[in-house]
Amino acid sequence: MTEAPDGLEGAGFFATSLEKVVGIARANSLWPLPFATSCCGIEFMATMGARYDISRFGSERPSFSPRQADLLMVMGTIAKKMAPIVKQVYEQMAEPRWVLAMGACASSGGIFDTYSVLQGIDRIIPVDVYVPGCPPRPEQVLDGLMRVQDLAKNESTRRRNSPEYQALLASYNIK
């Protein structure tokens, strides 16, 4: 159960802003799209299991279609040949969308400092939350998910239309 937003309360009524209600709804109904390529994917599977139970956070429905997801979870090593696919998946997601980079490889290339490995997905798409580790524990994944929930809950409904956000997308060459 989530906390009620700030508002006016009286006998038989409660009034708050639409923006706060939308934020709570977004935060508690994230549909993740797992983009797992290596060992971090196994830790994500553990997070989906009964012991850690990601469904407590409203994310029990992983979406394998970018058009139905609002949280892209990139896990594992991303080869440079795969980078255009990750970017295409991100572009196919509807706004609002968030990105979680899970593990050392997705965040910074990890131990693979080679010509064929992308040294962090933030070179091709904007990242909202980084989850450190090699591989990160399921508790860290849940903490990262809770940070994304905080972003979703507190984000203005107008932020995605702001000139700053449009400039950020333009810096990544995303329309």
Image (spheres, grey):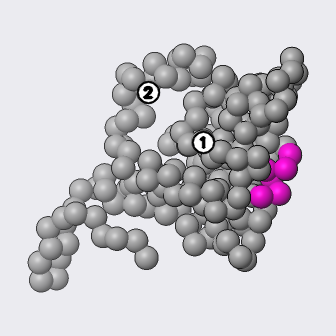
Q: Is residue 11 magenta?
A: no
Quarter of the picture containing the C terminus is: top right
Which residue lies under the disc numbered 2?
A: 165
The answer to whether 55 appears left or right of 13 in the picture is right
Q: In this view, does 105 lie above or below 61?
A: above
Magenta highlight range: 38-43
The residue that appears at 39% across and 30% down in the rendered structure is 161
The answer to whether 117 appears left or right of 63 in the picture is right
Q: Which of 36 and 32 is in front in this view?
A: 36
Task: Locate residue 131, reporting x and y percent.
Answer: 63, 46
The residue that appears at 37% across and 22% down in the rendered structure is 163
Res 46 quadrant in image: bottom right
Q: Does the magenta stretch include residue 40?
A: yes
Task: Locate residue 123, reporting x and y percent.
Answer: 66, 22
The answer to whether 103 appears left or right of 162 in the picture is right
Q: Nearer the viewer, residue 37 or 43?
A: 43
Q: Is residue 133 above or below residue 63?
A: above
Task: Locate residue 94, reporting x and y percent.
Answer: 57, 41
